[in-house]
Amino acid sequence: MVPSMLRRQVLDLLHECHLGIQRMKQLARTAVYWPDIDSDILDLCRQCWTCAGHQSEPSKAAVHTWMLPEKPWSRLNIDHAIDFPGLIWLVVTDAYTEHPCIHATQSVSAKSTIKLLQEDFSHFGFTRSFNRLRCYF
């Protein structure tokens, strides 16, 4: 229980890092208490220009970096671009060389996709890699 004459100092300590209303309340609940502490925190944060400037910002997504592949065609990025412009395209990109292979197709089915991937793998001579890939479809 914090006496009323020390509450402003405690609020200033809790607010030092401009954590925002919810985080400040969480931090306060772990260490201090007085009646109406939540409303005091709310009032303080609403008066703070720094907190107000960051209030509407969405949280930042975590960045996930992929490990670089050790050789060509060891990791592929595959997707369909549907109805662009008026056709369906299968886009296969090698993550190592960033070389794209683009195929016009009539279907997005697994059967037609595998057939096009077989062409790419046989063209580049990587038939063993395709056998591992097949199990994902």
Image (spheres, rainbow, N blue to C red):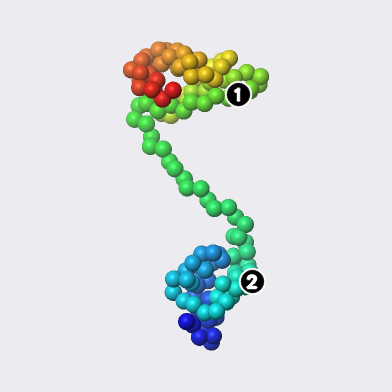
Q: Is residue 102 visible?
A: no
In what quadrant of the picture does the C terminus appear? Answer: top left
Question: Where 68 sits versus 15, above or below?
Answer: above
Q: Quadrant of residue 72?
A: top left
Q: Is residue 69 left or right of residue 35?
A: left
Quick one: 10 or 31, which is closer to the camera? 31
| Residue ID at (62%, 57%) | 56
Q: Position of residue 82 (x, y in %)?
A: 60, 23
| Residue ID at (52%, 19%) | 109
- Determine the secondary structure under disc 1: loop
Quick one: 92 or 105, which is closer to the camera? 105
Quick one: 54 or 4, which is closer to the camera? 4
Query: Which residue is label 2 attached to?
Result: 47
Find the distance from the CA under tag 1 to the CA under tag 2. 50 Å
Could you tell which of marks 1 and 2 lies nearer the N-terminus?
A: 2
Outermost residue, right direction? 86
Report the amino acid beneath label 2. Gln
Query: Which residue is label 1 attached to?
Result: 82
